[in-house]
Amino acid sequence: MNVITLALLLALTPAAWQNPQGSAPATTAPNTQSASPITQNAPLSQKGIDRIIKEVHHELVMLPFYGVFDNLAYKVSPDGTVTLLGQVSRPTLKSDAENVVKRIEGVERVDNQIKVLPVSPNDDRIRRAVYRAIYGNEVLSQYALRAVPPIHIIVENGNVTLEGVVARQMDKQIAEMQAKSVPGVFSVTNNLKVEEEGK
């Protein structure tokens, strides 16, 4: 099962939405009627998994309060289970994500493992400062112009994690240096993916 990070998907083509596990057994339509407890749905086909991946991605990036201070990821299992992962700065975003994914055809169950970050005025200050340091940088400012900026800044107890995708290795390094330059930051974990490495 491959965890798919939303920011990575924003920058990649639909071909990247393929599940690397290969083909799953044939699918049946989701069982919407009452059935005996013995009846189980067949595993989703690869085509069914790919469709759910695209729909989950679309629904999550369209959430009204999803932004650069949140990191949403997910994985789709052949049994129709969608596991939601990541960190959010607002509790409502966790429940909103689960609610929109539950309504997708073919999703049998949602396992919501999204972590709600603790409320902290100091972390809020660090979030804003890291945002200004990264997106205010001359080289990285190009990323701020996108509908959902691809560099996500997760702050917990003064520790910063950078998630998402950038075009070049140099951009990844600059983002890390900019985050480390912010006063009050204890550590920086750089999980940014580089587009050119995936080509």
Image (cartoon, grey):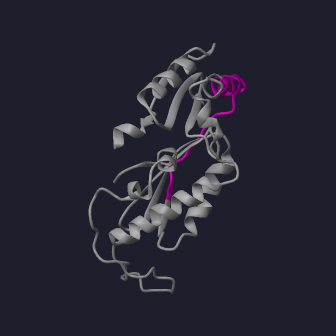
Percent coordinates x, y for residue 154 in the rendering? 57, 33
Seen at 51% across and 22% down, the residue is 174
Vertical order, 182 against 2 (above or below): above
| Residue depicted at 46% across the width and 34% down the height | 192
Q: Residue at x 41, y 57 (%)?
A: 17
Nearest to the observer: residue 33 or residue 130: 130
How many numbered marks appear?
Answer: 0
Q: Residue furthest right?
A: 121
Magenta residues span 111-132
Report the front residue among 180 and 119: 180
Q: Residue 52: where, in percent of width, then height? A: 46, 66
Quarter the N terminus occupies = bottom left
- Examine the structure image and report whether residue 114 is included in the region drawn in magenta: yes
Q: Is residue 10 above or below residue 47?
A: above
In front here: 108 or 3?
A: 3
- Where, by quadrant of the figure, is residue 96 drawn? bottom right
Q: Looking at the picture, does residue 2 appear above or below residue 181?
A: below
Q: Quarter-wise, where is residue 49 in the image?
A: bottom left
- For image coordinates 59% across by 60% down, the residue present is 59
Q: Is residue 18 magenta?
A: no
Relative to 134, is 196 on the left or the right? left
In the image, residue 26 lies at what x, y percent? 30, 77
Q: Position of residue 119 (x, y in %)?
A: 69, 33
Specify whether 138 is left or right of 65.
left
- The quadrant of the picture occupied by the C terminus is top left
